[in-house]
Amino acid sequence: MSDPMTAFPIRHFLSDEAVARVGEGLLARSLPRAEWTHEAHLAATTYLILGCPEIDLDAELPDLIRRYNVSVGGVNNDMQGYHDTITRAYLRGVRHFLEVAGTNRPIHELVNELLHSPIGRRDWPLRFWSKERLMSVDARRSWLKPDLAALP
């Protein structure tokens, strides 16, 4: 039986414009909900880190995602929508990936490499948090420190 967190094939980005469309779509709340995939989350994060240095992502990313979710008919509650610990873990992971990989290549190449790296996996946070802790209401509402291992 395959793991539902990792069973999906990776959806690649074919151009820098495709990555920008996702990042700008998040900001403008215009990205279709069906396109807000795991890959899109990481592409938007990469785009915002590299292309929008004026945005304090540690402070502003949570509300950017919450507002986007609501704009496409979603909700942010204790069961679905924005998840603070996962968002902050991936923000830290993408930053770490970019520090190691460098940023002197086209952004779509970086995003695709990220998606194939351990950090890009859907289950990457489970290397650091037990499933029970990571999927808890407390972890969804606010940052919870890892209980299995330290983040890179």
Image: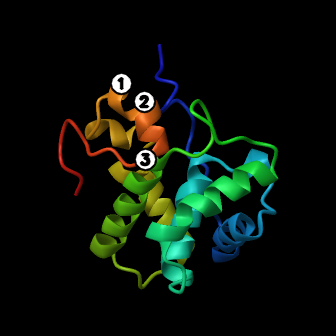
Which residue is tagged 2? 136
Horizontal and vertical percent for residue 56? 49, 77
**Figure check: 61 above or below 6:** below
Q: Residue at x 38, y 34 (%)?
A: 134
Which marked residue is nearer to the observer: mark 1 or mark 3? Answer: 3
Left/right of residue 54 with respect to residue 26 in the rendered view: left
Q: CA distance from mark 3 to mark 2?
A: 10 Å
Labels 1 and 3: the sequence-earlier one: 1
Which kind of residue does numbered mark 2 sit on? Ser
The answer to whether marks 3 and 2 mark residues whose Cβ atoms lie closer than 8 Å is no
Q: Kindly indicate the quadrant of the structure image that contains residue 100.
A: bottom left
Q: Residues within 10 Å of mark 2 (few under 14, many from 20)?
A: some
Question: From this viewpoint, is residue 117 visible?
Answer: no
Q: Residue at x 41, y 81 (%)?
A: 103
Q: Residue at x 43, y 30 (%)?
A: 135
Which kind of residue does numbered mark 3 sit on? Ser
Which kind of residue does numbered mark 1 sit on? Glu
Residue sitting nearer the eye, 48 or 11: 48
Labels 3 and 2: the sequence-earlier one: 2
**Figure check: 1 above or below 130:** above
Q: Does dot 3 land on a helix, a strand or a loop?
A: loop
Q: CA distance from mark 1 to mark 3?
A: 15 Å
The answer to whether marks 1 and 2 mark residues whose Cβ atoms lie closer than 8 Å is yes
Which residue is tagged 3? 142
Horizontal and vertical percent for residue 11? 61, 49
Horizontal and vertical percent for residue 78? 57, 33
Horizontal and vertical percent for residue 25? 74, 66
In the rendered image, the quadrant that contains the C terminus is bottom left
